[in-house]
Each structure stands twice: as structure tokens, then as C-alpha cells.
Image (cartoon, helix red, strand yellow):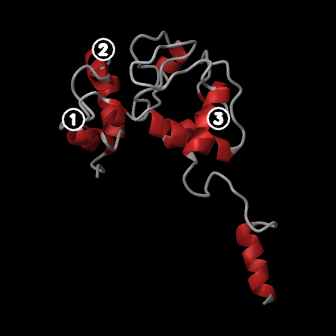
């Protein structure tokens, strides 16, 4: 019995477990509150939303950093080579100025992993371009992918390669994923 108790303490922590970044998916409702208090002064998430002090975040996941049309990014952000996803956002939101040195984003970051995870879950849900396109098919007609293709062909190809859902709305995504990911596309 003593060994079992010791083992469960080692696994769960001293107080019976601690909710952290690895405790499962983030809470979208909590993330919405975090976005409202910490992000909404500078960012919007809806399709066609305006840029504020920071860019509109709609279609964020899979997009190359610094590539959204209509916003003037710092050279550091545009040249960072970051493609936004859950992992990159978790690191960026911890300390933006350390993750992309030279960014003009004036935000200290969110230290608590659970809060970052909740915010990322909310951003994943609220910025999903598939849910917000007028025709409901997640592609075509003037969406962010068409803008990326036209204005940032290299960034567009990389974003398609890194977005696991891209093949749903652009057939060429599979071949780009194989090229960029070394044949590891699903």
C-alpha cells in the first residue's frame, strides 16, 4: 500500500494532481473570457473583422506569421518563418517578444499554461475559416487562402503544407505537404 501511495503521489503531484498544459484540451469558454480581457483591445477574430492595433486573427491556424493582408507587420514577424498552430501559439503567448524578437506586439505574455491552453482552444474554435465562410465549404471565393496565394505564394505553400485540414479545400495541399514534410503527410 505504501508503494502504491508513493507512486500515485509521484504521478499526480503532492495534492492529488495539478491542472496544467497537459491536462487535456483547453476550455473554449474560459478562453473566450481570456481573449476578451487580454486580447480584444488589439485583435478581432470574426471573418472580415477589422484590424486594430493588431491584425484580425480569423484563419490564424496554419497561416504563416506576418502574412495576413491589410496589416503592417514588423519585419521580425514577417520574416520569422513561424506557421501558427497550437504548439507555436502556446510558446508565442508565453513571451511574444522572446519568441519573435523585434515584434511590435506590446504584450507581456500569459505565464499560466492552463490559461494559454484555454486561449488557444478559443482561438482554434473562433478563427476557424471553415466555420465562417459564406458558402460553408471552407474555401473558394475571396477567402484568406486566395489572398495568401495571390500575395504571398511562398507563405501560402508553406501554410498549406502545415495545415492538416488544407487538403479539404485545396487539392494541391497533399503534394505540398509531401514536399515540405518529407513525405509524412497523412
Residue 178 falls in which quadrant of the image?
Answer: top left
Residue 131 falls in which quadrant of the image?
Answer: top left
Q: Earlier in the sequence, mark 1 or mark 2?
A: 2
Toward the left, the furthest residue is: 171
**Residue at the disc numbered 1:** 170
**Does 93 sit above or below residue 12?**
above
The picture places residue 118, in percent across and down from the top left corner, at 60, 43
The picture places residue 1, in percent across and down from the top left corner, at 78, 90
**Does 20 sit above or below residue 53?**
below
Say left or right for 18 vs 171.
right
Residue at disc 1, secondary structure: loop
The picture places residue 185, in percent across and down from the top left corner, at 29, 49
**Residue at the disc numbered 3:** 34
Which numbered mark, 3 or 1, is in the foreground of this view? Answer: 3
Q: Residues within 10 Å of mark 1 (few under 14, many from 20)?
A: some
Residue at disc 3, secondary structure: helix
**Residue at the disc numbered 2:** 151
Frontmost residue, 78 versus 136:
136
Amino acid at each position: 500500500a505504501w508503494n502504491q501511495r508513493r507512486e500515485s503521489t509521484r504521478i499526480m503531484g503532492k495534492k492529488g494532481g495539478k491542472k496544467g498544459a497537459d491536462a487535456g484540451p483547453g476550455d473554449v469558454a474560459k478562453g473566450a473570457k481570456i481573449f476578451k480581457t487580454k486580447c480584444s483591445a488589439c485583435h478581432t477574430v470574426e471573418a472580415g473583422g477589422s484590424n486594430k492595433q493588431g491584425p484580425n486573427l480569423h484563419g490564424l491556424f496554419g497561416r504563416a506569421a506576418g502574412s495576413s493582408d491589410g496589416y503592417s507587420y514588423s519585419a521580425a514577424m514577417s520574416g520569422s518563418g513561424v506557421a501558427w498552430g497550437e504548439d507555436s501559439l502556446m510558446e508565442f503567448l508565453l513571451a511574444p517578444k522572446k519568441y519573435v524578437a523585434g515584434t511590435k506586439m506590446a504584450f507581456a505574455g500569459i505565464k499560466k499554461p492552463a490559461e494559454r491552453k484555454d486561449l488557444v482552444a478559443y482561438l482554434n474554435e473562433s478563427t476557424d475559416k471553415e466555420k465562417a465562410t459564406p458558402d460553408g465549404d471552407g474555401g473558394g471565393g475571396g477567402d484568406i487562402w486566395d489572398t495568401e496565394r495571390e500575395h504571398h505564394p511562398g507563405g501560402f505553400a508553406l501554410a498549406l503544407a502545415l495545415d492538416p485540414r488544407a487538403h479539404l479545400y485545396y487539392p494541391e495541399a497533399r503534394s505540398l505537404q509531401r514536399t515540405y514534410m518529407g513525405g509524412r503527410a497523412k
